[in-house]
Amino acid sequence: MSEGCFSKEELAVLEQAIDTYGWESQTDMMIEEMSELTQSLLKFRRAKQNPTKKALALVSIHEEMADVEIMLCQMQMIYGNCAAERRYKLERLAKDLKKEQK
């Protein structure tokens, strides 16, 4: 994910959040949102064959994914872009996948 996923107006809101609440608070919020996504994913897995519980958990997953995306963009604004690391890790994954196919 990169800042390119957000419009200029959305980026301005994210920058205002960092300016208003501070980098430490937003970092704490990132940790909280990742934890909430983890909980939603686990609820989905536990729902097994219950379609109602699974549907509710899926809605929760989507909400928490959005929160994590928003916070991840703020983390990039605070700590810097990780495009080089992402590229390296994707290249490594591609190599690993080629090995798996042999």
Image (tube, grey):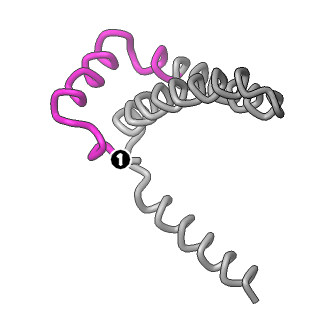
- Mark 1 is surrounded, within 10 Å at the Cα level, by few (under 14), some (14 to 19) or many (20 or more) other residues, namely few
Q: Residue at 73% of width from left, 28% of height from top?
A: 51
Of all residues, the one furthest to the top in this rendering is 20
Residue nearest the observer in this picture, 33 or 83:
33
Query: Residue 71, located in which quarter of the rendered image?
Result: top left
- The residue wearing badge 1 is 2
Magenta residues span 2-27
Q: Quick check: 41 left or right of 90?
A: right
Residue 95, percent across and down? 63, 79
Q: Position of residue 90 (x, y in %)?
A: 54, 67
Where, by quadrant of the figure, is residue 14 drawn?
top left
User: Where, quadrant-wise, is the C terminus in this rendering?
Assistant: bottom right
- Local secondary structure at mark 1: loop
Is 4 located above or below residue 21 in the figure?
A: below
Relative vertical location of residue 50 with respect to residue 25 in this rendering, above or below: below
Towards the viewer: 53 or 37: 53
Name which residue lies at 38% across and 36% down.
73
Residue drawn at x 52%, y 32% is: 65
Instruction: Name the dominant secondary structure of the magenta segment.
Output: helix
- In the rendered image, residue 20, in percent from the top left (x then y), is placed at 31, 10
- Specify whether residue 4 is painted magenta: yes
Tag 1: amino acid? Ser
State the count of labels. 1
Q: Nearer the viewer, residue 72 or 23?
A: 72
Q: Is residue 6 above or below residue 13?
A: below
